[in-house]
Image (cartoon, helix red, strand yellow):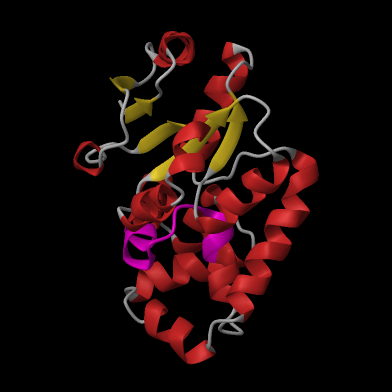
Amino acid sequence: MDAILLISKYPAIAEKWQSALALNYKITLASEALSDAFRPHALIILDSHFIDQQPFLISQIKQAAIKLLIVGEQWPEDNQVDALAAGAAGYCDANVPNFIILKAIESILQNEIWIQRHLIHKVLATLVNSTTSLQPALVDAKLANLSKRERAVAQLIGEGTSNKAIAARLFISERTVKAHLTSIFSKLKITNRLHLGLLFKKTGN
């Protein structure tokens, strides 16, 4: 059962999300964003008010190789785009129905992003611009930390291949693919397939 840290100063939000997730995940509640509490959670759900006050939290959580879902109430779309480009895995309105909460968490834990569909192109554009600023040699140096099998998985992710298809192509189980992705994300300090695909495409492979 994946462990999730839910950080919010608002009891109503915390109670709603805990209620929606408690049957499927191990939930820890907190009212302050303290880095000592981040590990060993697979995902952090963080109230947008913390990001407004401490934007460095996104980078801090990204460096810990922990997925981040930001929740808020009518948080500006530009903030949502900037957060995902900076390393967050998603944004979700705090008041969505429980089935949407579960779908968002499931998607993020499967290394996908979660954001309003009409904002995806803005996130992509921002990420492409930031990735373009990286020198190919620097990208190659980052990818050099991967094992031969991890690099093969990363290349297939860059081609848009699903976990199931990667498993079939490399003659390994989907569980092994997921284990490789966890290792890849940790080594490269990224949190989802989108960031990995863009980074890998920078090499020209």
For this orientation, the residue located farthest to the bottom is 137
Percent x, y for residue 56? Answer: 41, 53
Residue 173 visible to an observer of this rendering: no
Along the line of sight, which residue is nearer the eye, 66 or 29?
A: 29
The N terminus: image quadrant:
top left
- Residue at left offset 41%, top offset 11%: 11
Percent x, y for residue 2? Answer: 32, 30
**How many tags in the picture?**
0
For this orientation, the residue located farthest to the front is 53
For this orientation, the residue located farthest to the right is 118
Residue 25 visible to an observer of this rendering: yes
Left or right: residue 135 versus residue 41 is: right
- Residue at left offset 53%, top offset 48%: 164
Choose top left, top right, bottom left or bottom right for residue 147.
bottom left
Q: Tell me which segment is drawn in magenta.
A: 183-196
Percent x, y for residue 105? Answer: 50, 30
- Residue at left offset 22%, top offset 36%: 37
Along the line of sight, which residue is nearer the eye, 186 or 88?
A: 88
Choose top left, top right, bottom left or bottom right for residue 40.
top left
Percent x, y for residue 67? Answer: 42, 44
